[in-house]
Every structure is written in structure tokens, then in C-alpha cells.
Image (spheres, rainbow, N blue to C red):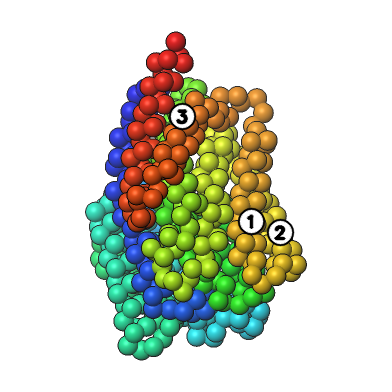
Amino acid sequence: MNKALSDINKDILKYTPSKVIGMLMNMAMVPIYTNLLLPEQYGLYNISIGILSLIAIIFSDWVGMAALRFLKEHFKTDNVKEFFSSILFLILSNLLVMYVIAFFLFNYLKSYFKVPEENLFLVLVLIIPIAFRALMFQILRAQIKPFVYTVLSIFNQFTTIGLGIYFIKYFNLNSTGILWGMLVSITLVDVIMLVFCKMFLSSSIKKISTKSLGGFYKYGVPIAASSLGMWIITQSNKFVIQYFKGSEYNGYIGVGYNVTFSILFPLFAVITLAGIPRIINRYEEGKDVSPLVSKLSGYFFVAFTPAVFLMCYFPQQLVLLLSNEKYISAAGLIPFLALSAFVYGMTEYTVIQYHLAKKTYLDMIIKISSNLAGIILLILLVKFLEEKDILWAVGVSALVSQLIYFGLTLIIRIRGIRDIVWVPPYRTLAKVITAILASYIVLFFSSEFVHSLSHTVIIQSILFVCMYACCNFVFNRVIAK
């Protein structure tokens, strides 16, 4: 196990820079947009992005993943033109189906969720460059061009932010200004990627391969279903609130998610990106992977428990630091959403058993069921609670749904395969909890000497590291004896 763990540690170091950059970009967008937009307009932007992400999940993202999976296979058999013909047919036919459905649902979405026509039109136009961007980004990955992929990703984010600011300030477009910025930016990136992806190889269209299409659907549709479960986690409650209360509350909810989920999830992914491929390889070799999974979850607790604790302890300061005082009402959401994200991160280690046993449908069923329970709870709370408690209802329902998800993954285990079940790292948990409590007590009694949030976070982090090192020494040297 030591060799596998050493390799994973090296991979963690490789993945960390890109994920940290992604996190910083997410953090940068929140204060910029919240300073330019009122909560109602920021809420409309968030609900528009929710609709756009749902369309992308169902009709385009999985096509890019299928392209990544099958491109090398077609290169080996010298069927590249057939591959591009099939993949282009797939994405164009999906978009056609999407537009037919949108034609019938347009007025329903506009009236039911109170979304302006211009926002919906822009979303339906945006899906075209987004669909091709998803496809070409995955082709860049398949062609092993990480530098081009990274540079274009960063360029896309910077130009989107810059153009969004331009359209908002100089054309007074409010929430649609960001969507216009996305449209211009992504279209520009698509044109650049056409060159790097060498899509001209498909210029002479060959006959569509039904066998290839079948393989794409078989591989991609389960991915779309799993992504839909993730969409339910992060987006569905916004639509419930949009229907019952309108877009102002969604402005606060958008800030809540963007200063918790958008910061934590890229960092959570560093460990799983590095660990899961090697866990799968080790399992396929017939080795026991449970200790390795337990060790990686220990990394998770050590790295992120202090961060979530600080989010829960300083919610108002976090909102003021990363957004605008207009959004201070979002502070009540922060502890619930930070804990929800943390519980979801824990669940990444309990669901590995389903992936190793090739029973990912169990994960999909549990994920969707638990989040439907959260939606039902939110609807009930919104109907019976007062106006001032609406954001509290959103936070509680989000946390409850994640606790149900985590609990069910602990209960529903794969029978007959004992070495893939997650075993909690009890010793690491004990050290983390002891270190947090000890550092908090020290900070509490010295709080009168510390006045700024940045100083508090730095001191708390240093104290935690010192206390954890002390706990590690005591557990390993004293208690172990």
C-alpha cells in the first residue's frame, strides 16, 4: 500500500495547482458580479445558469465525455473521419431534439419560474457554443494537450468575466450582460479550439456508424444521469425558491453556494482525482483497497475539517469578504451549505464501493432519491415558514438531503465483497477533533487581541497545524505504546 500511497501523493501535488486556480477564479467572480448586480438580478443570473447547466447535462456534456473515451480507439483503427461524423451527428441531433422540446416548454418556463424572455433566448443560443466547447475540450484531453487545455480554460474564464463587466456597465444589461459575455467568450474559444483539435479531419463526412452511436449512448447516458444527480444537489432548490419567492432570494442562495460549494468542491476533487484511478487499478489486481480508501479519507478530514469549521464560525465575515454587504442575508445559509458540502465530500469515499463493484446505478438511485427527499422537505418548509425563515429552510433541506445520502451509502453495502467497504479513519478523526477544539479554545481566550478575519484565519490555521502535530505525537508515541 505504501507504493500506491506514495504515487497518489505525487498525483495530488500535480492536480493541486489547476484546482486552486479554478477555486480562485470562482472566488473572483462572486465579488465582481455581486458588486455590479442587485440580489434580484444576481438571482436571475443564477437561475439562468441553472437552466443552462441542466440542458448541457442532458444534451451535450456527455457527448464530450464519450468523445474522450472513444477517440483513441478510432485513431488506432484509422476510422477518425467516421468518428467525427458520428460524434457531430450525435451532438447536432441532440441540439435539434432540445430545440423541439424548448419550443413547447418556453412559455411554461417563462411564467412558472418567472424568467424573462431575453434570459431564456440567450440560454438557448448559448447551448450551441457550449456544446461544441465541451466536445473540443475533451478532444484536447484525449490528444494529451494539457497546456493548451489549461490556457484556453483560463482564457475563457477571464474573457467571460471581462466581457460580462463590459456589457453590464456600458450597455446596462444587468443579468443578461453576463450571459452575453459568456456567448462572445465561448464562441471565440470555440474558434481557437477548432484549430488545435484538428476538426477539419471531419470535413469529408462519411456514413454515420450506428455501431459507434450505440457505443456513445451506452457510455454517455449513465454519465448524464449521474451528473443530473449532482445538478439536483446544487441547483434544484433554486427553482423551488424561484417558483415560490422569486429571484431576490436566489441572489442570496447563489452567494451562499458560490462561497461554499464553489470553493470547497474543486479542492475536494484533488484527492479523488489522484486516488480513484489507482484504487481501481489496485482493486483489479486483486489487492485489498479498504486501507487505502480509509487513508485518503483521512487526508480529507485533516485538510478540510478546519476550513469548514471556519466557514461555519465566521459566516458573516465570509459573505462580506467574498461578495457585498447587499447580500449579508446569505450569511445564515453558510453553515448549512458548508456542512452539506463537507458531508457530500465524505460520501465520495463511501460510494467507491459501487464503482469498484460496477454497480453505479445504486449510487445514482441513492443520490437522486435523497435529493428528492430534500426538495420535498424544502417545499413543505417554504409553505409553512415565515418569510424571514426561507433561507434557513434552504440550508436545512440541503443538509438533511446530504445526511440521508451519506447514511444510505453506509447502510446499502455490496454483499460478499468486504474489502471495498469504507472504514472510517477513527484515529485521524480523533486527532482532528482534538486539534480543532484545542486551537479554538486558545483562539477564544485571545480573541480580544485579534480584530481582523484574515489574522484570525491565519492564527487558527497555524494553531490547528501545531495542535494536530502534538496530537499526532501523543497518539503515535504515547497511546500506541
Quick one: which residue is furthest to the bottom in this view? 171
Mark 2 to mark 3 CA distance (whole Å): 35 Å
Q: Pointer 2 and pointer 1: residues touching (CB < 8 Å)?
A: yes
Q: Quadrant of the N terminus?
A: top left
Residue 11 has which mark?
A: none
- Mark 2 crowdedness (10 Å alpha carbons): few <14, some 14-19, many ≥20: some
- Nearer to the camera, 87 or 413: 413
Residue 396 has which mark?
A: 1
- Seen at 44% across and 10% down, the residue is 481
- Mark 3 crowdedness (10 Å alpha carbons): few <14, some 14-19, many ≥20: many
Q: Earlier in the sequence, mark 1 or mark 3?
A: 1
User: What is the three-letter code of the residue carrying label 2?
Assistant: Leu
Q: Earlier in the sequence, mark 2 or mark 1?
A: 2
x and y, in percent, of residue 72 in the image: 36, 48
x and y, in percent, of residue 113 in the image: 62, 77
- Seen at 65% across and 66% down, the residue is 389
Q: How many marks?
A: 3
Q: Secondary structure at mark 3?
A: helix
- Nearer to the camera, 443 or 313: 443
- Nearer to the camera, 106 or 261: 261
